[in-house]
Amino acid sequence: MHIERVELITVRMPLVHPFTTSFSTQTERRPLLVRITASRDGQTVTGWGECVALFDPSYSPEYLDGAREMLRRFLVPSLLEWQAAGRTVTAETVAAATAHVVGHRMAKAALEMAVLDAGLRLDDRRFADYLGVTRAVVPSGVSVGIESSIPDLLAQVGGFLDEGYARIKLKIQPGWDVEPVRAVREKFGDVPLQVDANTAYRLSDAPLLRRLDPFDLLLIEQPLAEDDLRQHALLAQQIATPVCLDESIVSVEAAADAIAMGAASVINIKPGRVGGYLAARRIHDLAEANGIAVWCGGMLETGIGRAANIALAGLPGFTLPGDVSGSNRFYAQDVTEPVVMKDGVVAIPDGPGFGVEPLADVLADVTIDAVDIAAHRS
Ligand code: OSB
Ligand code: MG
């Protein structure tokens, strides 16, 4: 394909309810969308990507303004230079075209994602078909933040269970762990339940974390620090709850190390965190070959990222429900037609590419910044 133009569109979206984790309280999200105009054989299409970096560098080193600057100053120019040198531009070549930039995987993932969507649209092909996914729907789980009281938490969880969500994930931190889990088990019984600590504990907390053993949780996500695979392996030997990694899995290599060390028996795959959907697919394949379950994580995506995640979650190794909830779990108004959760599942979109695009009037309303980069005609 020939890239004509790349736009970096920052949008502002209020959350329907504050989302508190061990690292922050969010009341709004500012996703960065990447719009690519690309052509081939006289046909011109628009491809969309979404950068999952949060506003602050609190979940990962990347953050909104840094990712936008990285794309504007380094990644997009590198891809355009690659193109000007006569090299092929496809989703499969974006990583090579930007390989001289160290790190910044979320920014790279957003660019690769937009190229992937554009390329699939030029081929009139669905992302799910590209992946070889044959399922039409995937189970939908929901991530529930830290609330100010147990009754508030039970009201939230009760609402999501009434809606039909297939699995509940509770955010935990020291002081908000055994009691909320016990309260949810006592009130709602044997529902599929897991917890996410976002690195809030230390290995010396193993005796405390062992108190979660009797609650038969599906998993505990990222209890310890991002860069401490070895201590996760030690913790896994001291608790019965399966250990799942999120923050630690920044690449295919990190996934291979974690599996080899016994640091994780489950992996949360977030395409943005690992550098894109192609790396995400490779981690899925690696995990499947090693008998490690995976599920699709979320980063409060708009309908764009949500649509792509839902297709990815259709791969056979995704044996646990993902954080792929309906748009209304976070947003009163999504930028796309809303993703709808019904009967515990969300449907893989039908159109070419990721099958969704922003609604022009909504996009205009929520856009707070736009950077426009034109390619030189060769
Ligand atoms: O740890 O999975 C996480 C949101 C932002 C940053 C990190 C995480 C999360 C979530 C929300 O848990 C998942 C979602 O988008 O539904
Ligand atoms: Mg997590």
Image (spheres, rainbow, N blue to C red):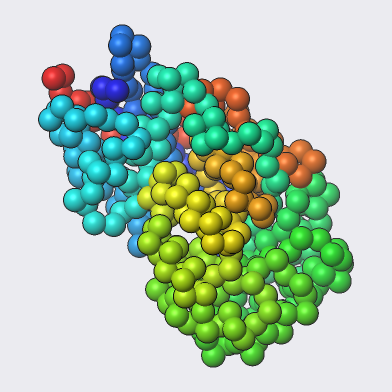
Closer to us: 212 or 135 = 135
The single residue placed furthest to the front in the displayed view is: 289
Residue at point 26% right, 22% down? 2
- Residue 316 relative to residue 79: left or right: right
Q: Is residue 190 above or below residue 69?
A: below
Q: Quadrant of residue 111?
A: top left
In front of the other: 94 or 306: 94
Residue appearing at x 29%, y 37% in the figure? 93
Q: Position of residue 41 (x, y in %)?
A: 30, 11
The residue lying at 51 percent from left, 36 percent from top is 131
| The image quarter in which residue 118 lies | top left
The image shows residue 149 at horizontal and vertical percentages of: 73, 70
Instruction: Give the residue at the far top of this rendering.
Output: 42
324 vs 263, left or right, is right
Residue 290, image x and y in percent? 54, 62
Residue 230 left/right relative to 333:
left
Residue 238 versus residue 225 in the image, above or below: below
Q: Of 58 and 167, which appears nearest the observer?
A: 167
Q: Is residue 335 visible to the viewer in this orientation of the structure?
A: no
Q: Tell me if residue 87 comes above or below residue 28 in the rendering.
A: above
Quadrant of the image for the C terminus?
A: top left
What residue is at 76 percent from the left and 60 percent from the top?
192
